[in-house]
Image: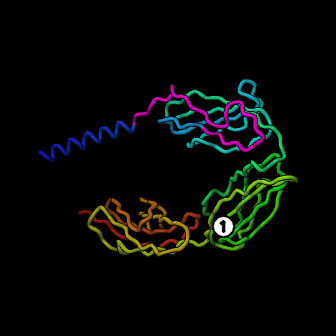
Amino acid sequence: MKKEILYSVLFVMIIFTSCKDIIVMDISDEKVVLLSPYDHLESYSSTQTFWWEYVEDAEKYQLQVVSPDFVQTETLVLDTLITKDQFLYNLVPGKYQWRVRALNSVYSTDYTIFSLQIDSTQDLTSETIILRTPLQNDTTNKQILTFSWDKLYNADTFNVVLLFEGSPSIDTLTAENSISLSLIDGQGAYVWKVNASNEISRTEYSERQFYLDTSAPLKRTLISPVDQSVIQDSITQCVWNIPSHDGSSEYDSLYIYSDSTITSVVFSAKVIVGQVEVELNPGIYFWGVRGVDKAGNRGVFSDVWSFELSAK
């Protein structure tokens, strides 16, 4: 009796879960409530955070900014899809309208529209440098990187500072909104930061951290099935050793081939643990593993071992 009750509960749970997975809520009658900048704002700050309330059952939001308005549009300034409830952007002086709608995989709300005016000023103290690339906590193996950020219309120069493991590495000025720098200090943690200035004022620094990792993952050692072994089961457990490492996170690529020239792949997988169960038809197979890290470094391929699956 207890088993029958348990099976019934499980059956109901499976049905409920399946139904829940395919139901998409209709949000077309919902309204996106815009929070900031408020309607008809006149501001000297070109850095604006567009902010609105979340809509229940929405998956993303479409934000559009035009100049001067959506009736007589001269410039499409911004059109982007995001999953969060705010977006930071730098504008130039002028009149704008901005609008947001919520979307899911089937439905969308109507747009809610606000107006905005940016007035000209040489005062940079309330502005923010919006960094673009590299991303926060990015990991790379490139020793020459391009750093980019959004322009400010009233800035004359940008001061770019690079720190390695907390110590100054590079400090340079540019009039552009991007610069390529060599990471001369080698592997490790870097901080890059940028501020803008003109003759009368400057912004605060905006900063991000990233990591340089140029070391390839170490060679993997195969454990089982051992080379030239014969297995009586259709399910094979491939096991190998992953050496310890100090660099960025790694995953392993497992390949099983049907030929000794290792060109015909019959199975492949990306895994973070050193074992995988594979179900194969009877035959002779060849297998090996390669480590790959978050920075894109690829380790050398392991030795290639063979095994035979015999029919029971």
* Region of the chain picked out in magenta, as a range: 22-51
- Outermost residue toward the top in this view: 71
* Residue at image location 50% in from the left, 36% down from the top: 58
Where is mark 1, residue-wise?
Answer: 190
* Residue at image location 38% in from the left, 74% down from the top: 223
Q: Is residue 103 above or below residue 47?
A: above
- Outermost residue toward the left in this view: 1
Image location of residue 23, percent across then percent down? 40, 34
Q: Main secondary structure of the magenta part?
A: loop
Q: Is residue 33 above or below residue 138?
A: above
Q: Quadrant of residue 84?
A: top right
Image location of residue 120, percent across then percent down? 83, 40
Q: Nearer the viewer, residue 180 or 88?
A: 88
**Residue 47 among those drawn in magenta:** yes
Q: Secondary structure at mark 1?
A: strand
**Residue 193 among those drawn in magenta:** no
Q: Amino acid at mark 1?
A: Tyr
233 vs 66, left or right, is left
